Image: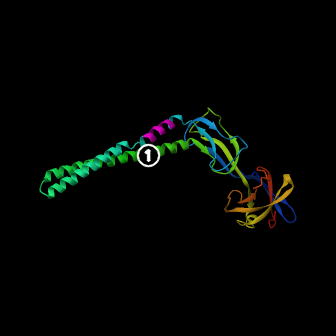
């Protein structure tokens, strides 16, 4: 019995014996990441090649940021320049001191209420100018943060520990918004084998269960763990998806090789 599926598993092979039926799949990476740029631009630097091992956060590729960095430096300089604010704060203190003196004079009968009201108004206006200057500086700091975010969008970093299998661009090439994919990284610390089993065979497995599978090309058996048993039976085939993870922390197994799973209680 042989059923072809358009999925991770290429074929399902049932090898009937007196005691078991074997189902065939292929190993694949635990994760396959298509790293992409956040916005279009020209490639300025490529840090990796195929076959390189990367850690989370490692820089893979960077787009040109010359114009943006110049704008960022100008915004940073304005954000750090608080001379105007300090000048306004000095003026505010002077206005406040004058108001307090006029109030003291008024209490002794030497000052007028009109002078106090004008001094209060001058103090309030100066207070508003100080608050406005503070708001402008805060806005400039926000603009710097936004530019930092845009700069980071032009740098592509690895989100995982893995192996670079593809680098799609060279220095000087343009990366468009329609095709932002620049590199592919795979996580081979574990390999996944996806099987599609008849319902009675799938019911023999549970998530977390240890299970032995066979690698025909290497003529060896390895123990894996059931990652997931599908809750839905495919209506077109009557099959259930079962994912099995194989530990590969020492890189002794290869992705893309055949793997066979025996279902002892399944009758052909």
Residue occupying the point 69% across, 49% down = 162
Secondary structure found at label 1:
helix
Drawn side of residue 34 relative to residue 81, left or right:
right
The residue under label 1 is 141
For the N terminus, the image quarter is bottom right
Residue 129 visible in the shown view: no
Q: Quadrant of residue 175?
A: top right
Residue 225 magenta-highlighted: no
Residue reaching furthest left? 109
* Dominant secondary structure, magenta: helix
Q: How many marks?
A: 1
In this rendered view, identify the residue nearer to me: 163 or 87. Answer: 87
Which residues lie in the magenta part? 69-77
Q: Is residue 227 above or below residue 7?
A: below
For the C terminus, the image quarter is bottom right
Q: Is residue 14 above or below residue 128?
A: below
Residue occupying the point 87% across, 55% down = 219
Q: Position of residue 86 (x, y in %)?
A: 35, 45
Residue 118 visible in the shown view: yes
Q: Position of residue 64 (x, y in %)?
A: 57, 35
Residue 74 magenta-highlighted: yes
Mark 1 surroundings within 10 Å by alpha-carbon count, few (fewer than 14), some (14 through 19), many (20 or more) = some
In this rendered view, identify the residue nearer to me: 98 or 212. Answer: 98
Q: Quadrant of residue 195?
A: bottom right
Drawn side of residue 228 relative to residue 77, left or right:
right
């Amino acid at each position: 019995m042989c059923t072809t599926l358009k999925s991770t598993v290429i074929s399902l092979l049932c090898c009937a014996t007196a005691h078991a039926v074997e189902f065939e799949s292929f190993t694949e990476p635990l994760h396959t990441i298509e790293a992409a740029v956040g916005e279009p631009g020209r490639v300025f630097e490529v840090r990796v090649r195929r076959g390189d091992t990367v850690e989370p956060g490692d820089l893979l590729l960077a787009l040109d940021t010359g114009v943006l960095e110049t704008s960022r430096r100008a915004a940073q300089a304005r954000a750090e320049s608080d001379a105007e604010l300090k000048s306004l704060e000095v003026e505010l203190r002077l206005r406040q001191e004058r108001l307090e003196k006029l109030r003291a004079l008024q209490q002794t009968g030497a000052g007028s209420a009109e002078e106090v009201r004008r001094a209060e108004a001058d103090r309030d206006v100066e207070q508003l100018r100080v608050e406005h200057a503070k708001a402008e500086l805060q806005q400039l700091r926000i603009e710097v943060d936004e530019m930092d975010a845009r700069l980071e969008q032009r740098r592509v970093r690895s989100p995982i520990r893995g192996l670079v299998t593809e680098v799609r661009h060279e220095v000087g090439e343009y990366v468009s918004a329609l095709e932002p994919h620049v590199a592919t990284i795979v996580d081979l610390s574990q390999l996944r084998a996806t099987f599609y089993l008849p319902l009675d065979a799938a019911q023999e497995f549970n998530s977390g269960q240890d299970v032995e599978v066979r690698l025909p090309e290497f003529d060896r058996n390895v123990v894996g763990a059931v990652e997931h048993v599908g809750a839905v039976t495919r209506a077109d085939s009557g099959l259930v998806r079962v994912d099995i993870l194989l530990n590969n922390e020492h890189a002794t197994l290869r992705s893309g090789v055949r793997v066979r799973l025996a279902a002892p209680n399944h009758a052909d």
